[in-house]
Amino acid sequence: MLAFLPAPVRAALAFLLFILNTLFWCTPLYLVLLVKLIVPSRGWREFHARLLVSIAESWIGCNNAIMGLTQRIEWDVQGLDGLRRDDWYLVSSNHQSWVDIVVLQRVLNRRVPFLKFFIKQPLIWVPVLGGAWWALDFPFMQRHSAAYLAQHPEAREQDWETTRQRCERFRNTPISILNFLEGTRFRPDKHARQQSPYRHLLRPKSGGLAFVLEALPDRVRHLLDVTIVYPDGRCTFQDLFGGHIRRVIVRVRQLTIPPELLGRDYRHDAEFRAAIQHWIGQIWTQKDTLIDQLLPPADRTAA
C-alpha cells in the first residue's frame, strides 16, 4: 500500500499503472490475434480463444493488484459461494458508473467464466481496447433510438438476428454475459423523467435479457443478480483514481431462471413478455429494498 504518498501522486500513479498494464497485456493478445487471422483453422480458434481469455483474466488480475497497491478501499462482498467456471451465467447489476465494470471484474474474475457484455458498435474504434474487445468476441451491437425504431421497425428484427448470431458463438464455451437492465447509468434526472417506481433504480428493460434466454435456452440457466453500493456516494473513475472511493459493498445472488422463461419468443409472445417483465420486476423490487438497507441512513432519507 502506497498510503504514504500524497493523494494526487497516488492518483497519477494508479492511472499510469492502469495504462501500462493495459498496453503490456494487449501486446501478447494482439500477437495471438494475428496468428488466429493467419491460421484460421477450427482447432486453433478454440485454443486461441482459451489463450485470449487467459490473457484478459491476467490483465484484470493485475488491475486488481494495482487497486490494492494504490487505493484504500474496503471491500464488503457476499454471495460468491457456489459459483463455477464451467457453467453459463447471465449477470445483471444496477448501473451507476463505468466503475461498476471494474468492480464486477474484480469480484467475479476467475470465479465464473470470463465476463462479456454487449458493446455499442462505434466503440470498436477505441484505441487499443476496441481491438481487444473484438479479439475476445465481445458482441458489438447497433443501438437505435426509439424514434429510429418507430420509422424502421425492421431494425428490431436485425437486432434480434445479431444477438442470435453472437450468442451462437457462446454455445460450446461457458461464458458470463453481463446485461445492465437499466440500459443506462442511474442519474436523478433520468429517474425523475422515467417516474421510476423504485427509489434507487431506473426502470429495467427486459428485451436484451430475453433475447439471450431465447438464443441459448439449453445453456443459460442461472442469473447472477449483483447489487453494487458505494456508501460514500462517489463512483466515477476520477473518484477511483483519486482515492475517494473508500468502501464498496457488493451482494451477489445466484437465481435459477424459471424454465418457462427459456426459449420463448419475446418479440411475438405477449404472455411471455408479461411473465419475464413480472419476474424482473420482482428482482428489481428486492434489489431496491436491499440498496435501501445497505446505504447509510442519511442517504436513505435523501433518496
Image (cartoon, rainbow, N blue to C red):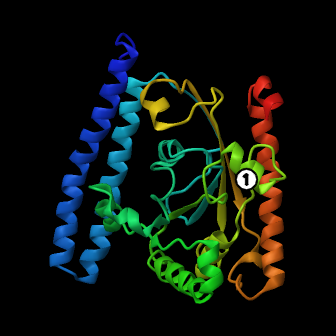
Q: Nearer the viewer, residue 62 or 117?
A: 117
User: Where is residue 282 drawn, in percent x and y?
Assistant: 83, 58
Element under disc 1: loop
- Name the residue rendered at 50%, 48% in the picture: 101
- Name the residue rendered at 77%, 70% in the picture: 258
User: Where is residue 171 drawn, in percent x and y?
Assistant: 49, 78
Q: Which residue in the structure is indicated by mark 1?
A: 202
Quarter occupied by residue 159: bottom right
User: Where is residue 124 drawn, in percent x and y?
Assistant: 35, 65
Query: Can residue 90 be seen in the rendering of this structure?
Result: yes
Q: Nearer the viewer, residue 238 or 287?
A: 238
* 44 on left or right of 191: left
Query: Can residue 218 be seen in the rendering of this structure?
Result: no
Query: Are there few (<14), some (14-19), or many (20+) residues within 10 Å of tag 1?
Result: many
Give the position of the N terminus as an image quadrant: top left
User: Where is residue 100 drawn, in percent x and y?
Assistant: 54, 45
* Above-or-below relation of 128 to 219: above
For badge 1, the amino acid type reads Leu
* 68 on left or right of 155: left
- Name the residue rendered at 51%, 55% in the picture: 112
* Above-or-below relation of 139 to 30: below
* 184 on left or right of 33: right
* Above-or-below relation of 96 to 126: above
Q: Nearer the viewer, residue 8 or 181?
A: 8
Give the position of the C terminus as an image quadrant: top right
